[in-house]
Image (tube, rainbow, N blue to C red):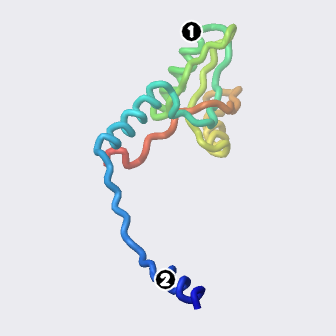
Amino acid sequence: MLFVFCSVSVSAQSKGKVEVIKDPRVDTLIARRAELEKAVGLDQVTGFRVQIYTGGNRKDAYAAQAKFQEQFPDIRSYVIYSDPNFKVRAGDFRSRADAEKFQADLKKWFTSTFIITEKINQPKAENADE
């Protein structure tokens, strides 16, 4: 009899509402953290870029970058110095397939290209204005 009474009282509990109360400064801290991560480069992820130039001449590297920017003004390119060579890499691709498609488009202007796996900049959110 005692067992039946205890089980009835336990099942008599009802569901309730949860109300979250937070300080508005929490949102400010979250926004500041995102800005700080971007400033220090923590917003980067592993992805792919297409290397379009490798050589020891700085002028040739910047000439290759300028040639690239003429043909693809909307795609970022990067000049990297790794002793003893300058390298020009283009794009911020999340998938290797996208990088391979872009590499095929580049064959017209650059003969020796290859895909590099490295940290890339994250693409901007499509609805960043909201």
Residue 59, labelled with which disc?
A: 1
Residue for point 57% across, 32% down: 120
Are the residues at dot 2 and dot 1 in contact (C-beta closer than 8 Å)?
no
What residue sits 60% from the left and 26% below the top?
89
Q: Nearer the viewer, residue 110 or 37?
A: 37
Q: Note whether 111 is above or below 128 in the view shown.
A: above
Of mark 2 and mark 1, the one earlier in the sequence is 2
Q: Amino acid at mark 2?
A: Ser
Q: Is residue 26 left or right of residue 124?
A: left
Instruction: Report the quarter where the N terminus lies.
Output: bottom right
Identify which amino acid the numbered label 1 is placed on: Lys
Task: Describe the element under mark 1 as helix, strand or loop.
Answer: helix
Camera-near label (2 vs 1) is: 2
Q: Residue furthest front?
A: 2
**Percent position of residue 73, x then y:** 46, 31
> Is residue 61 or residue 95 the one in the foreground?
95
In the image, residue 92 lies at what x, y percent?
56, 35
| Coordinates of residue 81 in the picture (x, y in percent) | 61, 13
Q: What secondary structure is marked by label 2? A: helix
Q: In the image, which disc is placed on residue 9?
A: 2
Q: Residue furthest bottom?
A: 1
Residue 26's mark? none
Place residue 16 in its image quadrant. bottom left
In the drawing, does residue 35 fall left or right of residue 64?
left
> Dot 1, crowdedness within 10 Å: few (<14), some or many (≥20)?
few
Which residue is pictured at 62% across the width and 37% down the height?
47
State the CA–CA distance, disc 2 to disc 1.
83 Å
Q: Nearer the viewer, residue 33 or 100?
A: 33
Rendering coords of residue 5 (x, y %): 53, 87
